[in-house]
Amino acid sequence: MIKACIFDLDGVIVDTAHYHFLAWKRLAAEMGITLTERENERLKGVSRMRSLEIILELGGLAKSEHEKELLANKKNSWFVDFVERMAPEEIFPGVPSLLGSLKEKGYRIGLASSSKNAKTVIQLLKIEGLFDVVVDGTMIVNSKPHPEIFLLAASKLGLHPSSCLVFEDAESGVEAALAAGMKCVGVGSHEQLHKANLVIPATGEFQLADLLELETV
Ligand code: BG6
Ligand code: MG
């Protein structure tokens, strides 16, 4: 039986995945690398440093640890600039009401984001009160597709992983949820997220009936 819903943040609750892309694209361009939306799919869900390493691999570039730190910090400062100008309207449509109605039905709500900026984002958007538990990139060693983040969220919720349903927009996130022994709703394209138990185009389109159906698969 599903007792909790655990949400990824970037690209599931709010459109910050787009800001990550813009910032990485700018950094890549400075290094003479063109980062396409397709390649960007590989950066979703993984840590800041892993994202940078993927970009460097794409460009065939090698950098020292110190240079990588500087590059990752630069990208992060651009990302934070975007986030600080974000308005509550950038929360995806239907998301606050979905979380509210899940809560009303007695489901616990968790947030599990690889981002070290997750707490800042939910505070700026004034939605931190929607979550019973928040796990972010500062609290884990292994980022998605490793299941660590979801297992930590389940343990903080005091629930067995099999009682948790994850919402994810990243292929690495879907893999992490399944590896944690959880069911997963993919938010985005079927082509990218076909391993998920259900794929929906937008978080706000999820219905309680979908949840009951997922309990039977
Ligand atoms: C994930 C994003 O939520 O957080 C990734 O999908 C991002 O694209 C990762 O790289 C780390 O984020 P941050 O804010 O710690 O750089
Ligand atoms: Mg995401």
Image (cartoon, grey):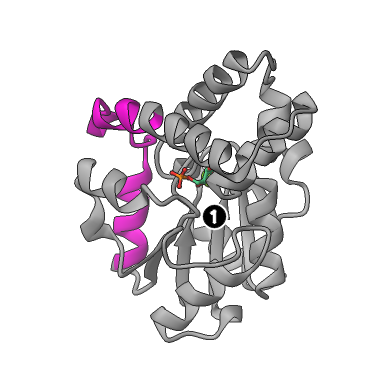
Q: How many marks?
A: 1
Viewer-side residue, 4 vs 32: 32
Q: Secondary structure at mark 1?
A: strand
Q: Is residue 109 visible?
A: yes
Left or right? Give the position of 62 relative to 18. right
The amino acid at mark 1 is Phe
Viewer-side residue, 121 vs 182: 121
Q: Image height check: is 65 above or below 39?
A: below
* Residue 134: percent from left, percent from top: 36, 65
* Residue 17: percent from left, percent from top: 50, 34
Viewer-side residue, 202 vs 23: 23
- What residue is rendered at 34% in x and 74% in y? 106
Give the position of the C terminus as an image quadrant: bottom right
Q: Is residue 2 visible?
A: no
Tell me if the residue at label 1 has its CB under 8 Å from ligand 2. no
Range of residues picked out in magenta: 79-103
Give the position of the N terminus as an image quadrant: bottom right
* Residue 28: percent from left, percent from top: 61, 21
Name the dominant secondary structure of the magenta segment: helix
Left or right? Give the position of 116 relative to 182. left
Left or right? Give the position of 152 relative to 217. left
Q: Image height check: is 42 above or below 25?
A: below
Q: Disc 1 marks which residue?
A: 167
- What residue is rendered at 21% in x and 41% in y? 124
- What residue is rendered at 71% in x and 32% in y? 56
Q: Image height check: is 143 above or below 20?
A: below
Left or right? Give the position of 194 relative to 182. right
Magenta segment includes 135: no
